Amino acid sequence: MVPESSPMTKESFRLGNLEIRPPLVLAPMAGLTHSALRSIIAQFGGVGLYSTEMLSAKSIPFENPEKSPYLIRTARETPLSYQLLVGQASHVRPAVERLEELGAAAIDLNLGCGAPKVRKLGCGIALWEDEDRLKEVVWKIRVSTDLPFTAKIRLGPCLDRAMFRRRLLLLEALGLDALYIHARLDREPFSRKPRWEWAGLAKQWLGIPIIINGGIFSLEDATRCLAQSNADGLMIGRAAAIMPWIFSCIASGLSGLSSPPPQIDLPAIYHSFCHGLISRFPQERRIGRLKEFTHYFSRNYPFGNRLAMAVQGSTSMSEAMEKADRFFEKNRGTERFKGCP
Ligand SMILES: Cc1cc2nc3c(=O)[nH]c(=O)nc-3n(C[C@H](O)[C@H](O)[C@H](O)COP(=O)(O)O)c2cc1C
């Protein structure tokens, strides 16, 4: 018999006034979680909540939503959470007003990025480490909007249970609606095994939904992560760029339904992504994004590094697409992942 709280039957979580169903969130990823990728993922379904990449709160009020690759979106990428990088509380209100005008479903605060450029601006982990400024910024966001408000964090600079708990309770007390926890320490690389059980401690301490992130590449990973952490939902990053259909696989697994695996045609997905870039973004904003996506998508093939290198060496979309077509032709039948992982 499956217990009532079995992770195999997780179907949704609440995010303020939203019900996130299925309980699967696309992770924010700079250069990757733009409209072209979100649209491909939407073709397969299974996402409860989409995310933008991190957006500078200082710049966002001045971006043109028709032209900015950070803001362009289609109606299908709904509900969409916008992630903000904030260094100063004074940047909050204009940014939040802008996101409300753009139809944001939720606002997420980046407290986990440790990139030197981001730290230098006092954002991401630098904000997380500065308790007074953290309180000021989080409170400012909370009182500026009725939209669901989340933060995305890592586990901290070292495994310090008391410190971790203190910070989590602080965020909850300041009115967050849910928390995304990337289950790694601040400086740990993505190659390191995630510490799902550590992130799961938050479930014991907080009443708000906890969504765990890090290292989920299959239904089996998703099930183990939920079992180890008792989390309310999962956030998936890199696997979404490798297998944009992964959400549909995990969603049907978690709901207990045995839906047929999606039909996967890798070259068709790649073309559709390229056309998404061409139709949405100005010319100079396309090839960089194609290289970033190909870095991940090429992992679907045993010799995918050849595809990644060919696209990396291209200077235009047409050159990259031609080289990719040649690769697909030559490597037909060798695909590593063509169904549910
Ligand atoms: C290329 C790339 C860009 C990322 N950009 C962001 C970002 O803008 N904001 C953020 O909070 N995390 C960012 N991350 C971290 C991811 O959201 C996620 O926490 C991380 O990839 C671990 O999850 P995964 O194992 O499912 O990929 C990025 C990760 C990658 C690989």
Image: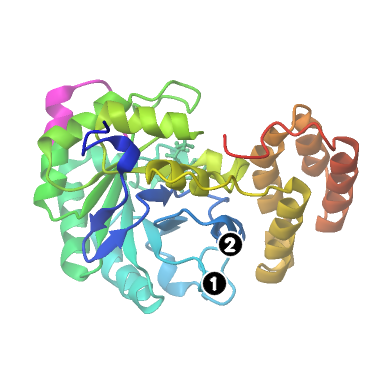
- The residue wearing badge 1 is 74
Residue type pointed to by label 2? Ser
The x, y position of residue 40, in whole percent, is 61, 57
Q: Secondary structure at mark 2?
A: helix
Magenta range is: 154-166
The x, y position of residue 22, in whole percent, is 37, 53
Residue type pointed to by label 1? Thr
Task: Using a 10 Å C-alpha cutoff, classify the residue at mark 1 as few (fewer than 14 neighbours), some (14 to 19) or many (20 or more).
Answer: few
Residue 286 at least partly seen: yes
At 20% from the left and 55% from the top, the residue drawn is 177
- The residue wearing badge 2 is 39
Q: Based on the picture, tell me whether residue 155 belongs to the magenta stretch.
A: yes
Kindly indicate the quadrant of the structure image that contains residue 80. Answer: bottom left
Kindly indicate the quadrant of the structure image that contains residue 234. Answer: top left
Q: How is the image coloured?
A: rainbow
At 43% from the left and 21% from the top, the residue drawn is 193
- Image quadrant holding the N terminus, namely top left
Horizontal side of 297 relative to 173 (left or right) equals: right
Measured along the vertical axis of the image, is residue 220 above or below residue 86? Answer: above
Is residue 84 or residue 340 the one in the foreground?
Answer: 340
Horizontal side of 263 relative to 111 (left or right) equals: right
Q: Going from the N terminus, do you reach mark 1 or mark 2 first?
A: 2
At 38% from the left and 42% from the top, the residue drawn is 254
Measured along the vertical axis of the image, is residue 269 above or below residue 115? Answer: below
Measured along the vertical axis of the image, is residue 162 above or below residue 285? Answer: above
Task: Using a 10 Å C-alpha cutoff, classify the residue at mark 2 as few (fewer than 14 neighbours), some (14 to 19) or many (20 or more).
Answer: many
1 and 2 marks in contact (CB < 8 Å) = yes
Residue 155 at least partly seen: no
